[in-house]
Amino acid sequence: MENQSKDRGSFSKLGFILAAAGSSIGLGNLWKFPYLTGSNGGGVFVIVYLVIIATIGFTCMLGEMAIGKYTKLNPIGAYGKIAEKWKFVGVLGVLVPFLIVTYYNIIGGWIMKYIVESLLGHLPAIAGDSANFFTAHITASTSPIVYTLIFVIINAVIIQAGVNEGIERASKILMPLLFVLLLIVAFRSVTLPGAVEGIKFYLQPDFSKLSFNTVTAALGQCFFSLSLGMGAMITYGSYLPDNSHIEQDAVLVPLLDTFAALLAGFAILPAVFAFGFEPSAGPGLIFITLPAVFDAMPFGTLWATVFFFLVLFAAITSSVSLVENPTAWLIDSYGMDRKKAAWIVCIVAFLIAIPESLSMGVWSGITFPPMGLNIFDEIGYIAESLLMPAAGFFMCIVIGWVWGIDNFAKAVTNNGEYEFKSKKYFEIMVKYVAPAAIFFIWLNSSGILSIFS
Ligand code: PHE
């Protein structure tokens, strides 16, 4: 513990909110939310998602921030301090973000490819062409890996500069700019001829499309998008001074994150319908749709370039927080200096990204039982569907039943310095609602329930 303050730095209040929002607003909002909405029935997915954010999302957000603020340690050290026997939950908090960062880098690389191609004016706007263009890129053997490497290097450089210099400064400028651009693109999308169908699809829930899979997808997305269940917010919380009002932050950060996701939906889904694309196209949806939206704007090439740039920055503020977790752990546990720790994490993550990227092309034949997923999807499945909800579940158990609500409240309020307004709500959520819901959904997504149906 002597190491805890060495090289750790600390956040200002605004810096924390921006960095936490920067971590949560990323590819999860801009890339994943629109395509999940598109493939899970539209409006009904949005409703389920909002309910989950307000219940489980808020609970886990406040939980993680409080654990971090109180312990001032990385996830493993933090769990060791509040509940020694539950240290393994913290191990997930280092392992899961590391797994995610391996493929997050690849998608970051796809974004970089689109920046370059839009600069060159090469992005095809027509349905079939843009789908082929996207597939051709992600299945290639070298180019996506080279772009991944560039993305990884940018991350390592920012991380080694430390929390104040790197993350905080970048977040302050780029996140507000991203919102402005999202608003402009969303405005263009909803005013396209034929966009009305898409707006209806997005906003009018069709409850006949509600299925267990909708709920599973929404829960996974809540964790992924809010950067929960992997200790990212524990690590950021650990840089907070004791007198910070994290209860407000735990509302504000999910609000900003959800606002960004909803805007991204407005930017993509109306355009999908206006141009006759397929809403259930999956991970390629934004890459296929956005070029057509930009094509319908004056100075489209310019907009496209600027927009993909901002998506890239949103991705970077998220991926640095993914890298930050294992990095902070190496600093705290091994007394390593920040620079060395950051580079080790980034290089190993890149090496794992190579087979992942190839698994979308030449190595697509290599699959894993029981679901026959390729390497890329398998690692995503292990991280997001199995480990992440498990970490969220155990965190609720630790807070609700081991560390205890009273200790938790002391951590939130800095020993009663101010009122914990949502204490009752939080208590019911963390002890009963959240763990039960996560457990049930986890059973479903792990495929165990399918045995009974
Ligand atoms: N929340 C980020 C996004 O939406 C991804 C992320 C997950 C970042 C977990 C950090 C930790 O893109």
Image (tube, grey):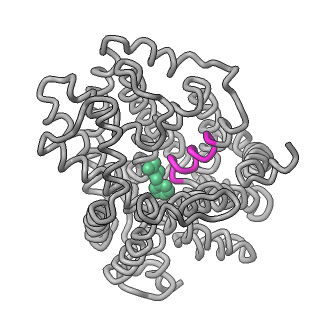
Q: Secondary structure of the magenta portion, mostly?
A: helix
The answer to if 219 sits in the magenta stretch is yes
* Residue 333 at x, y percent in the picture: 51, 84
* Outermost residue to the right: 452
The quarter of the picture where residue 384 lies is bottom right
Determine the residue positioned at 76% across, 58% down. 397
Using residue 186 as the reference point, say whether residue 71 is left or right of it. Answer: right
- The quarter of the picture where the C terminus appears is top right
Residue at the (48%, 81%) spot, across then down = 332
Note whether 295 is above or below 196 in the view shown.
below
How far across and down, in percent of the image, does residue 156 sit? 30, 71
- Within the image, what quadrant is residue 306 found in? top left
Relative to 27, 57 lies left or right: right
Tell me if residue 19 comes above or below residue 86 in the rendering: above
Q: Residue at x 36, y 54 (%)?
A: 138
Give the residue displayed 75% in from the left and 52% down from the top: 447
Q: Is residue 413 magenta?
A: no
